[in-house]
Amino acid sequence: MLKGYIPPYNATVVQKLLDQGAVLLGKTNLDEFAMGSGSTDGIFGPVRNPWSYSKQYREKRKQSHHRADEDSNWLITGGSSGGSAAAVSAFTCFAALGSDTGGSTRNPAALCGLVGLKPTYGLVSRYGLIPLVNSMDVPGILTRCVDDAAIVLGVLAGHDPKDSTTTQDPVGPFILPILRDVSKLCIGIPKEYNVPELSSEMQAFWSKAADLFASKGAKVVEVSLPHTSYSIVCYHVLCTAEVASNMARFDGLEYGHRCNVNVSTEAMYAATRREGFNDVVRGRILSGNFFLLRENYDDYFVKAQKVRRLIANDFVKVFNSGVDVLLTPTTLSDAVPYLEFIKEDNRTRSAQDDIFTQSVNMAGLPAVNVPMALSSQGLPVGLQLIGRAFSDQQLLTVAKWFEEQVQFPVIQLQELVDNCPTFSQHEKLGLVSLKR
Amino acid sequence: MWRRTFRATLRAGLGPGATGAVAGAPGARVGSCRFAGSDSEKAAGPSPGGRVSAELIEHLERLALVDFRNREGVARLQAAIEFAGQLRAVDTDGVEPMESVLEDRCLYLRADEVVEGSCAEDLLQNSQQTVEEYFVAPLGNITLPKQSEQHPVLKS
């Protein structure tokens, strides 16, 4: 739909980075209009996870008697901000922006071994971010280490007069202290996140992380977020309803793709939108219009808004009971091959994959994926930390502590190693950062 | 304490890599179950397990303008409606709808003054059909034909 479109202005988040001297390297691929959890439904094709080509993954494949050099079985990045994740993961750039409405920054961060930050709703301006769900969208930040994410957040956070949903309270600075003593920290483990679909390997990593916090003196408690299981359905209704409204601006008249039908305005709109949107987008628009019909409005849309309050209140109660940070998985497992991922349709996949990340958007809280370790397949797994609203600095401080403890390995990409004689295989993540 | 969280699933005994095979979210229920919701159960469109009527899809297409009245579009809509039906199981008595997480804050609104603009040329450049400073649209007073009446060129 936006083929050939050149924006006549910069988004606030882009402008802020440019003002601080950032060099814009390019725009990255994603699921169309950020609808998807695999970055497989974009007009430029699916995004490949750089870890598919890593030494770590290929060696594991060889060990299990698969051909290590086969190209057809490459892995997805996760989505919807998969292109941004791939770019950072492959050392193309130091940082990339994504969007996060249901987990679209944290999901690919987990599958690509990156720090994926979803700031508190209201902290970072959405001016210039194509809206999906106005009350849940935030620009996301993808980096290789927590300090870099804090640097970028420090540039982006703050009131923007052009976005009335940004907080006017003073924010930052986001310089992260080094946490030496976690004994005053209380970590919550939400029991409803222990779903049957969670792979046993992911569950083991989650448990190991909880043990790590406990062994260093933190208080680790089980908590309950009882309405978790309804967040996907609630999101389904609210998202499609907002999409039906937000996508109405794409009609081919003022910008973007326009088809040749000239019989009438409505016919032109319909044909343009059929050509310009993929099935996922069109399906959501149609469903959204159904939920917004006068006779359905209360039963679906308002009902979903009520359920949203219940979900948000769950988090408030937990944080009020003394928990500082929640620790959860980010994804059900490590990255899966593209050929396997596409066996199910977009909606099914999104419903499955968003389970750990979605409720955070409902409540507008900050959350970050921190890469933890490599799975038995040699692929990244990450865990999610969730904090109180506007406690982004504290959240990142804990994330930085965790990152330091787990020492996630650097991706070993053969060509990269060959071309950079000074880049040793044992180089740790933190050394290749913006701080240098 | 929190270790109970992990022990519960170990007993369920799911093997490694078992993902993606389960459709729908935990607690998912198909639309044809009876719901214990306290809110009104009347809704337009299909009754649980029913089909989307031709009239409904025509109406939605007029509103959505995505040309998705074919079998696939109807099937997707059907599935979406059934999926959303699960909401009825939640008790929301006395709960206020939440529109925004910032509802307790007073948000800043700009003064109604023009501070930037005068970029008509830049904006017109993005459009495919313009005449001087106008965006050109086809006739607006012709309604979208029903699927049965469609011009062959428009049939998807």
Image (cartoon, helix red, strand yellow):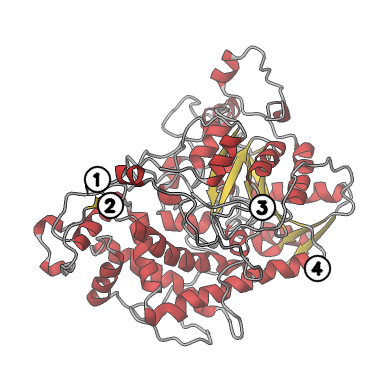
Q: Is label 3 in a helix, a strand or a loop?
A: strand
Name the residue beneath numbered marker 3.
Answer: A367
Name the residue beneath numbered marker 2.
Answer: A252
Q: Residues within 10 Å of mark 1 (few under 14, many from 20)?
A: some
Say yes or no: labels 3 and 4 on the same chain. yes
The percent position of residue B45, horizontal first and vertical second, equals 33, 79
Q: Amino acid at mark 1?
A: Gln
Name the residue beneath numbered marker 4.
Answer: A321
Say yes or no: labels 1 and 3 on the same chain. no
The label on residue B128 is 1
Q: Is label 2 in a helix, a strand or a loop?
A: loop
Task: From the viewer's perspective, tell me whether residue A356 is left or right of residue B145.
Answer: right
Q: Amino acid at mark 2?
A: Gly
Say which chain tag 1 marks: B
Q: Residue at x 25, y 58 (%)?
A: A269
Say which chain tag 2 marks: A
Task: From the viewer's perspective, tell me whether residue A223 is left or right of residue A112.
Answer: right
The percent position of residue A258, horizontal first and vertical second, equals 24, 49
Q: Is label 1 in a helix, a strand or a loop?
A: loop
Q: Residues within 10 Å of mark 4 (few under 14, many from 20)?
A: few
Q: Is label 4 in a helix, a strand or a loop?
A: loop
